[in-house]
Image (spheres, rainbow, N blue to C red):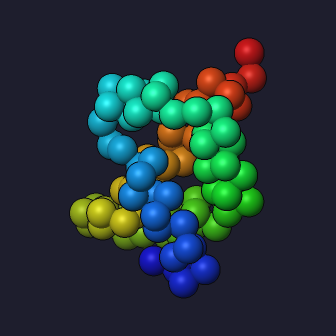
Amino acid sequence: MPAHLRGLVPLAEYWGIGDDVLREMMQEGESPAKKKAMADAVTPHNGAITAWLNGLRTGEPMSDEAAAFMYMQLGLTELELFREE
């Protein structure tokens, strides 16, 4: 994991839920303020997170840390608060 992303680990551990149903349920239970705080913290790093994940070796198992970051990004795009309709 890149050193400059380590500060986001607590957010990835909390928001990076791999199960779609559980992630949606958790998000629905969170306040708009908490969702916005997560988005504000993660969004500036989306490019770096994506670059890190894209740089992982294909065909090898993804680490728990990488998976948490991937699902955190997915959850961010799923949040109603930030959906464009």
Residue 81 horizontal side relative to residue 21, left or right: right
Residue ranking furthest to the bottom:
3
Question: Does residue 65 appear in the picture of this structure?
Answer: yes
Q: Quadrant of the C terminus?
A: top right
Query: Which residue is at a point 58% across and 33% down the rendered structure image?
Result: 31
Q: Quadrant of the N terminus?
A: bottom left
- State the residue in front, 34 or 12: 34
- State the residue in front, 4 or 32: 32
Please say if 21 is above or below 67. Answer: above
Query: Which residue is at a point 51% across and 39% down the rendered structure image?
Result: 75
- State the residue in front, 60 or 71: 71
> Residue 45 occupies which quadrant of the picture?
bottom right
Please say if 30 is above or below 2. Answer: above
x, y (%) of residue 69?
46, 57
x, y (%) of residue 54?
51, 62
x, y (%) of residue 84?
74, 23
Query: Which residue is at a point 67% across and 58% down the rendered structure image?
Result: 41
Count of numbered marks: 0
Question: Does residue 20 appear in the picture of this structure?
Answer: no
Residue ranking furthest to the top:
85
> Residue 13 occupies which quadrant of the picture?
bottom left
x, y (%) of residue 81?
68, 28
Residue ranking furthest to the left:
61
Query: Which residue is at a point 41% across and 52% down the rendered structure image?
Result: 14
Residue 42 horizontal side relative to residue 53, left or right: right
